[in-house]
Amino acid sequence: MPPLYTFFVVLLLLLVVFSGFFSGAETALTGASRAHLHQLSKSGNKRAKLVKSLQEKFASSISTILITNQMTNHVIVTISTWLTINMFGEGKVPIAAVLVAVFVIVYTEILPKMLAIHSSLKFSLFAAPVIRWAIIILKPLTTLLEAAGKASLRLVGIKINPEVNKVVTDEELLGAIEMHSQTGQEEKKKEKVMLKGILDLDDVTVGKVMVHRKSLMTIDCGLPTSQVIKEVLNCPYSRIPIWKDNPENILGILHTKSLFRAMKQSELKLSQLNILSLASQPWFIPETTNLLNQLCAFRERRSHLALVVDEYGDLMGLVTLEDIVEEIVGEIADEYDVGTSGIKVQQDGSILANGSVPVRDLNREFDWSLPEGASTIAGLVMQEARRIPEIGQSFTIRGLNIEILKRQSNQINLMKITAVPDLSENV
């Protein structure tokens, strides 16, 4: 083979490698994890910082890669056509064109992209310096062609906003969490619950997690001191709302430590104790306060408990710091906690649930997607049924059959929840 032909064959192979490199770089730059790159850049990885900057200037990076790739491919076609004509004659050009097209598709598109998908982070870190220099060299041409493209889009009424999709949304984070927890490992599922709980703090109000006023443990400050002490000893909590005349007329929060300290100072002369004077001022918050703001407020006030009121100032319930923490880490129980979970899994897979069980607890426990417009499962059933259901009635909500088992007056006490078979899986 004449030296000139050898030179062009070698050049052709180099151009194929060059084109394949940029083709893989396009895929790698798109697929590289931004979160991983962020962590690497924080640890001082300069190439990770470079890849991050290329992703932030995504339009310019992709335009440069595409222009370089297309120019290289055109040169490959031109050289291969010239070699075919001079080595085999014009009659072989159609056959050579097909062979070159297959060769280019396999070795400059499919193979490089497969490698980039398999190791997108490593590929992007390796390719970043070359892409940066290509952007610098081709910037005038890239700017001109981008302007032509934007002008063409404006002719049909499409405007490009370069800021769109730069910010990672909550939906993207939730999707990443769901994918992260699909491995089936128990630890991954726990991580999923905790991570989703953190993201939900800004969307969930205290009204969804509070202890309802019907379930509050309170003490009448008008009782004899000995009776108050007995009530405190029988209560599993260290902070207890105290009231006068009306259980919803909360006058203060009695801390057991304050009571026992006062008992010691009075040398157990109970008649000298003024229970109301030992209580701290109650803190009232609106039921629309979200958990994130309330968590910050607890920290700022160095408080652990707040009373929840509605728009009319009526007492709705009580929320504690532990209630909010449990939204992140799950149920926290100690030896004094009262068993109020209200959920029992049957041998046949069905679930017995008290009507007072929060919908959020069921969704978190069983990975369901029940609507959380109502706080409790009983409230959800009545909301969906638009009436107070009778015993024995069943309702299907989000693929779950809910049967009413017990009802007292207008309150649903117990229900049975069973998954409805998905018939589409048998099709």
Image (cartoon, grey):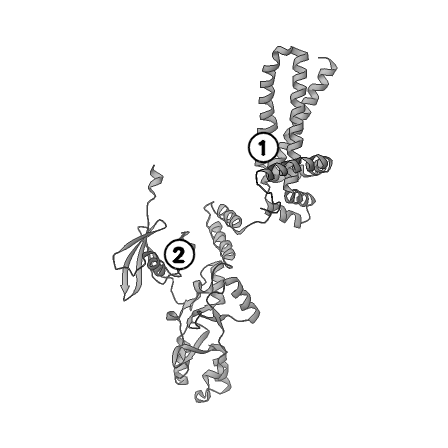
The percent coordinates of residue 296 (x first, y second) are 55, 65
Q: Quadrant of residue 66?
A: top right
Residue 123 visible to an observer of this rendering? no
Give the percent coordinates (x, y) of residue 78: 67, 20
Screen quadrant of the C terminus: top left
Q: Residue at x 50, y 70 (%)?
A: 304
**177 sits left or right of 347 in the view:** right
Q: With respect to residue 345, does 299 lie above or below? A: below
Cα distance in 3D space between marks 1 and 2 = 43 Å
Neighbor class of circle 2 (other Cα within 10 Å; few <14, some 14-19, many 20+) is some
Viewer-proximal residue among 297 and 120: 297
Is 192 displayed left or right of 64 in the figure?
Answer: left
For image coordinates 65% across by 14% down, the residue present is 84
Q: Which residue is mark 1?
A: 113
Q: Is residue 167 left or right of residue 336?
A: right
**SS assignment at label 2:** helix
Q: Tag 1's secondary structure?
A: helix
Across and down, in percent, residue 4 comes to 74, 16
Mark found first going from the N terminus, 1 or 2: 1
Location of mark 2 (residue) = 362
Q: Residues within 10 Å of mark 1 (few under 14, many from 20)?
A: many
Using the image, determine if residue 4 lies above or below residue 268: above
* Type of amino acid at the residue the image marks with label 1: Lys
Q: Amino acid at mark 2?
A: Leu
Q: Residue at x 28, y 54 (%)?
A: 394
Question: Contact, CB < 8 Å: mark 1 with mark 2?
Answer: no
